Structure formats: structure tokens, C-alpha cells
Amino acid sequence: MWKRKVIYYIVDILLINIGFSISFIIRFGLKIPYYNFSAYTSLALVVTIIYIASNYVFEVYDVKGQKVEDLFEALFKAVGFSTLLLIALAFIARKFSFPRSVILISFIINYVLLFFSKVLLSKIIPLFPDKERILIVGKRRDIKKFLKHVKTSELKREEIVGCVVESNGNNGNDINCPILGEVGNISHLIKELHIHRIVVVSTSSYRTYTENLHNNAEDNVRIDVLPGIYEILIGKLQFTTLGDVPLIRLTRNGPPPWYNPLKRIIDVVASLFILILTFPLSLLAVIAIKLDSKGPVIFKQQRVGKNGKLFTIYKFRTMVPNAEAGTGAVLAAKNDPRTTRIGRILRRYRIDEIPQLINVIRGEMSFIGPRPERPEFVERFKHQIENYDERHSIKPGITGLAQVYGGYDTPPDIKLKYDLFYIYNRSFTLDLKISLLTVRTLFFGNGH
């Protein structure tokens, strides 16, 4: 693994200096003033160290198990921090005549070069892998039986790092494999041991904790399952092997690596544009709410976001103040008596959602995704609806399939089907379709 990090360091050192050279050309053209460029060359080592150190501090080099959107954010912070340090250095060390305009240009150039180089390397390096590091998961007796079969073949490119037992009731170790803990420790073990692949060998009970594995495993960690007779009979499953033992692959193919970073850029740009465009409409909504009923214009409430993280959502108030004072948390219903006259109009045309653009800009939400629910309802639905928590694997959205095909009063289990379909099949094509259907709702008032 250290060899891979060395490659990242070397590539970064080259690209940082190439990025600054490009920045000089953009600023001055091909006739770069000697004293300006010499000022950079005299500081090149310091500049490179600042960039590499910032990348390290902001965990840009924690490439194993890192999602593209996390890299996008970490690198943005690292390059931004480096840029601020260099601007400060340029003010302090004036004798070097290091142009601050070049530093600002380099922020964009170096960010683009470093980001795409890491995405590219993440695709190229696995083509020349070290041994694939494997974690075996299952019941003790099944692991023992599985390893007995696997050892009959030579594993040239695989390394079984250890085993995670379904239950640690028996403290003895008779399976010739390091026991690393239980299924609840999967997330920690994957990062700590740089696991590439999880093999589930207990076919009789894997369904009881497959959801746990999916929730805790990173996106690029493959999950393979030893097939039982049922899985073999139904077919239509991706086939793979470990040595000469047949396995089936459960891991779903996600969107391409550039999908989430590009979607984030679109979210921010579109949110700013729509906030400006809808300002007159928002102003009318504010006036109408104040004239219609007493109480605050903006409604704030705790919602559950990605990975279960709580955040405060913003909406135009559509209900009477203290609507749940006598009832506690209650789901919105069709023709809800708590809704104000103006509130019904705002909901019908989704105008009440406009303030959530602030949540999108802050990174708590996206334009498109499952609608965020209140913590009270999430706890209830998790026990009532199977796989409900999986809807929190991505950022919640202002609109989604459940909103354009359903309404405020659509039952949670039906909404979940829409949400899971989106999560498993998300793409820019599907996002465009949902966006167009949302526009239709805005103009024709098909919402509830």
C-alpha cells in the first residue's frame, strides 16, 4: 500500500509545479517576466511542501475506501488552504515578487489537475494490484469448511487477512484464521486493514446481516457470497470465484466516479441561480404568509440526512403556528386541517421548498434525492419497514421520484420503493427526467 502512496506523492509533486507553470502562461502568455518566474523557482520547494502537507492534513492521501465526493471536498479544502498560505507568504516575502494573480489562477489549475489525476490513478493502480486483501464473514463452522476448500487451491493474487464471525459465542480459534471481531466492526476493519473484498460464507443466514455489510462497507469494497442451492437455481446473478470456490457478487454498480462531484457543482450553481430567479416569488410568499396568519415566515425543523446525520431544514411555513402542540409528531395528510390557506397554495406548487436551496448550498441536501424525514419518524419506520435506513445512503433532496409521482400523503413504504429505485439507478438521465417532472408540478400544481 505504501508504494501506491509514493506514486500519489510523486505525481502530485510533478503536477503542482506543472500547474504553476500553466498559471504563469495564462497570466503572462509565453513571454513570462524573468524576475517573476525566478521568484517562483526560488520558492518552488516551499510551495510544493505546503501543497503536499495540506493534502496530507486534509486526508487527500487516504485513498483506500475514499469516495469521489469525499476526495472532491478534501482536495478543495487542501488546495484552498494552500492558496491562502501562499498569498500570505507573498505578502510577507515581498522581495520575491511572486505574483498573487498567479497564485489565484493556480488554485483552479492545480485543483483540476490534482483531482482528475487521483480519479485516474484510482482506476489505473488497481490494474497492477498488490495482493487483494480479503475478509471472510460468517458462522465459525462455515468459515472453517470454506477455508478447508479454499486452501486446496493456490491464491496467487489474494490474501485472506482474517475472519469476522457472526457470533463470538465460542472463544476458541479452531479455524486457522485470525478472528478480528464481529460484523459490527466491519467499517473499522475495512479502513484499518485496507480490505478490498468481503466474502460471506454462511448462506443459511447471510440475509440477516447483508444489510449491515452494505451499510458499513465502502463503495469500492466488493461483497461476494457463497451461493446456496436457491441462488444457484434462480441464476441471473454475477458469478465470480475465490480459488476454485464459486461465489456470487452482491455489490451493486453505482454511478460513475465523476457523477457526485459534478452533481455537487450543478447543485450549487443551480441553487444560486434559482434563488435569484425566484426572489420576487419568494417576496410575494413572505408577504402572503404574514397577511394570512401570525407566526414566523420560515419554518425550521430537524431532519435526518446522509448517513443519519441531523441537520436543520428550512421551508416557508404552511401550517398554523404550534401545529403539533396537542398531538405531537404527526405526518402531513391530504387536506390537513393544520394547513393555512396560503400554505395549501404553496404546497400545491412546491413554493414552500424554495428556502431549502440554502440547505443545498450548504451541502446538507441535493436537488434530487429521497426527501429527508424527521428523526421521530425515521426511528418508527426503521422498525416497521424493511431496508428503510438504506435511503440515508445518499444526500436527501428537494425533489425525487416519490414527489413527482406521489404527494405529501403517499404512504412511507411506497415512497421508499421510489427512493430505493432512485438510489440503485441514479444517473444524470434520471435526474433530468425528475427535474422535468418537477417543473411540470410547479406549473400545473400536481403536488399535494
Image (cartoon, grey):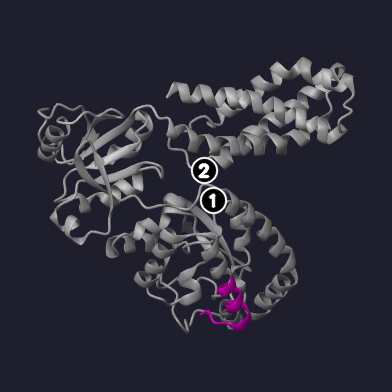
> Left of 232 or right of it: where is 68?
right
Q: Quadrant of the N terminus?
A: top left
The amino acid beneath tag 1 is: Asn
Q: Main secondary structure of the magenta part?
A: helix
* Residue 73 in magenta stretch: no
Q: In the drawing, does residue 360 fall left or right of residue 327?
A: right
Q: Give the quadrant of residue 431.
A: bottom right
SS assignment at label 1: helix
Task: Tell me: 373 left or right of 113.
Answer: left
Residue 184: x and y in percent read: 27, 41
Res. 343 mark? none
Residue pictured at 12% horizontal, 33% vertical: 148
Mark 2 → mark 1, Cα distance in angstroms: 7 Å
| Quarter of the view holding residue 164 | top left
In the rendered structure, which disc, 2 or 1, sits on the residue that comes first in sequence?
Answer: 2
Q: Position of residue 442 (x, y in %)?
A: 61, 77
Q: Nearer the viewer, residue 335 or 353?
A: 353
Marks 2/1 in contact by CB < 8 Å: the verdict is yes
The front one of 198 and 331 is 198
Of residues 310 and 320, the one drawn nearer to the viewer in this rendering: 310
Which residue in the protein does label 1 denote?
260
- Name the residue rendered at 60%, 83% in the picture: 444
Above or below for 212 versus 314: above
Disc 2, SS: helix
Q: Is residue 440 magenta?
A: yes
Q: Residue at horizontal 60%, vertical 39%? A: 116
Residue 68 circle label = 2
What stretch of residues is rendered in magenta?
436-448
- Seen at 27% across and 35% down, the residue is 135
On the image, the x and y values in percent for residue 118 come to: 55, 35
Q: Quadrant of residue 198?
A: top left
Callout 2, which amino acid?
Val
